[in-house]
Image: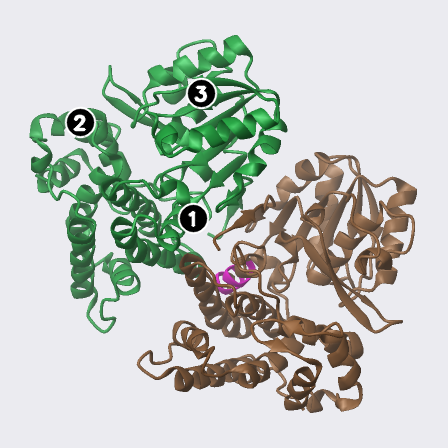
Chain colours: A green, B brown
Amino acid sequence: MFNFTYNIPTKVYFGDNQLSNLGKEIKKFGKKVLLCYGGGSIKKIGLYGEVIDELKKENLEIFELNGIEPNPRVTSVNTGANICKKEKIDVLLAVGGGSVIDCTKAIAAATFYEGDAWDIVTKKVPVINCLPLVTILTLSATGSEMDAGGVISNLETNDKIGVASPLMQPKVSFLNPKNTFTVSPYQTACGAADILSHIMETYFNTTGSMYMLDCFMEGMMKTVVKYAPTAMKEPENEEARANLMWTSSWAINGFARACQKCNWSCHPMEHQLSAYYDITHGLGLAILTPRWMRYILDETNSERFKNFAVSVFGIDSSLDNMTASLKGIEALEKFFFEDLKLTKTLTELNIDRTHFDIMAEKACGNGVLKGFKELKKEDIKNIYEMCL
Amino acid sequence: MFNFTYNIPTKVYFGDNQLSNLGKEIKKFGKKVLLCYGGGSIKKIGLYGEVIDELKKENLEIFELNGIEPNPRVTSVNTGANICKKEKIDVLLAVGGGSVIDCTKAIAAATFYEGDAWDIVTKKVPVINCLPLVTILTLSATGSEMDAGGVISNLETNDKIGVASPLMQPKVSFLNPKNTFTVSPYQTACGAADILSHIMETYFNTTGSMYMLDCFMEGMMKTVVKYAPTAMKEPENEEARANLMWTSSWAINGFARACQKCNWSCHPMEHQLSAYYDITHGLGLAILTPRWMRYILDETNSERFKNFAVSVFGIDSSLDNMTASLKGIEALEKFFFEDLKLTKTLTELNIDRTHFDIMAEKACGNGVLKGFKELKKEDIKNIYEMCL
């Protein structure tokens, strides 16, 4: 039962004034760097200029790919990979949130494939090699800065699919909490919901965990609950931003997961939501998660729910399992929809049941979603219905 | 405040049946391997034979250094380094507990120095290069399997000194809880005290931590308190052994330490004890730690003591700081001296005050020990006196 391989080689420069190490780290991998970023917020906060200055200090040759979308598209991956092939890029530098980093990971792999990058995302062809990747994080959410995976969307097919390879793991990541000071309260809340969901997907598992790692996950969940509302109210609170940032990385880098092999539940359901409606991933997770919990909670699994309730939300441990569990779910709902002010229903987002059937089918891969509790297509449809 | 570099590249194969990966991992570094171990317990448990088999499968050329002592001596380091130089060893394989791994780390560095290895331990010369190191752990205690340091003793001068370099960090470590099934209750207890002390030395600091990491440390301390007595009573309890083993690595690998820069207190005092009397490191820590806590506790630092008491031992959080703190120390004493059955006083070990003066002087490096509370030579002597 206690078998796993731990391998998280990403080096992290955490905190302020660390960017002076950027040039020397990039240089280890070569001269030609492709700088990848999104809609330009990194220019607004002055980070773009700082990055360029540091790269120039080391006489690196800079190429750029900008305009990477939230829920990044495979079209951007192909564009990036073409630049890498044409210009013989040595190393990739992603500056942004999870979407930018995910897209850049896919570019790293697609550079070594002659066809459409979608073949890699859909696993039609394997990841055989990757360009080295350095990241500078500007949003605490997906954990992509320290893990080996990414999620890519295809608007033509309404697909949103995860791809992972140890080769995609960032070599070095720069995590400066101050780079998240300008993240809006809404995006801060969505990021917090994403972090919390990563931990919960791991915490609620059927294959057992280690007590030591359970404690770690409970501590991380408490951290999100404690600091996300603070970061929304006081966007320049460094303590809150630092705690959220480091938790975002550790929620999903593989350490907490260790020996358990259970699949996730809410992420596959949410990926369909954002594939069909392009909503923010964390928002979709916040809407789905409490409904999923209410749907699957029963006497056989309530002990885990109670542990969650007691350790994360301080629910009275003397209550019976089911009562404590329900109070925990209520506390989570209060956290998402009152403290984080997130939208509570799909209806409010103008999403109706039109696509629930095909979304449910895709979420379970035409079979069964083997998460904490097995979900069939009908179950997933029921959970979507509960979100209206 | 939230500035640090995180860099823990050690790959870990955790659990049973992982040794089949040994040969291929060693082979990455070369053909000639020096197998380093201690008094032969690895032969009794059959591990020696398994290791040799795996190495032979990959046609590796095996050299051996055995008889590495607890509190490993610089003489063993020199012996090992001489073998490496003479035989042109490519890679080191340490099989054992912290003493064997520490000694092998020092050999890794001393191989690239022509003089006495003690010059490296005493920092007379810097670590400029190291042979790559792979470890197979057989005792959960020092955390040497995943950190960059080691402690070497010199019986001629009664010195016990730590040496560290990122170059010494093991490349790969094999952690199989089953390899600790034969560890005696006494050694299990000493190991647990060492692990707990590593966490406490980090938890009690003046430079501040991150809440997220405080939670992690509290979880690890709870893990030790929960599982050490179980492992003593049921030596083949895999859950207990696995939790202790993974906690031993994470207690000191640098993750929990992150942004705080405070020095340690009990380890420097204990190193003098085991340097002068060759007692087991963990036992010395168990004797010293509660006395140190009672000596330094005051109104200005009692909040931290209370957090410790509440989170690790479940002391009532509604108590005032000083009362809760004292109850926490009592609970720790009960844990060490009743649950773990460790000797409570130096007197019982036939240690008297003969060397307290010189030991205290060495512990504070002839100045001040800048830990959670600054300790001068007289303070350290007082703490040693409390241990009689």
**Image side of residue A377 versus residue B102, left or right:** left
Q: Which residues are magenta?
A: B239-245
Return the residue at label 3: A107
Callout 2 secondary element:
helix
Marks 3 and 2 in Cβ contact (< 8 Å):
no
**Image quadrant occupied by the C terminus of chain A:** top left
Mark 2 crowdedness (10 Å alpha carbons): few <14, some 14-19, many ≥20: some
Q: Kindly identify the residue that appears in the image at 72 percent across and 87 percent down.
A: B349
What chain does badge 1 belong to? A
Q: Nearer the viewer, residue B268 or A163?
A: B268
The lab-note entry on whether marks 3 and 2 share a chain reads yes
Q: Amino acid at mark 2?
A: Tyr
Chief secondary structure of the magenta span? helix
Q: Is residue B106 left or right of residue A279?
A: right
**Where residue B160 sits: x, y (%)?**
77, 68
Visible residue check, residue A82 = yes
Q: Position of residue A359 (x, y in %)?
A: 18, 28
| Mark 1 Cα shell of 10 Å, populated few (<14), some (14-19), many (≥20) | many
Residue indicated by mark 1:
A246
Q: Which of the marked residues, 1 or 2, is nearer the chain's N terminus?
A: 1
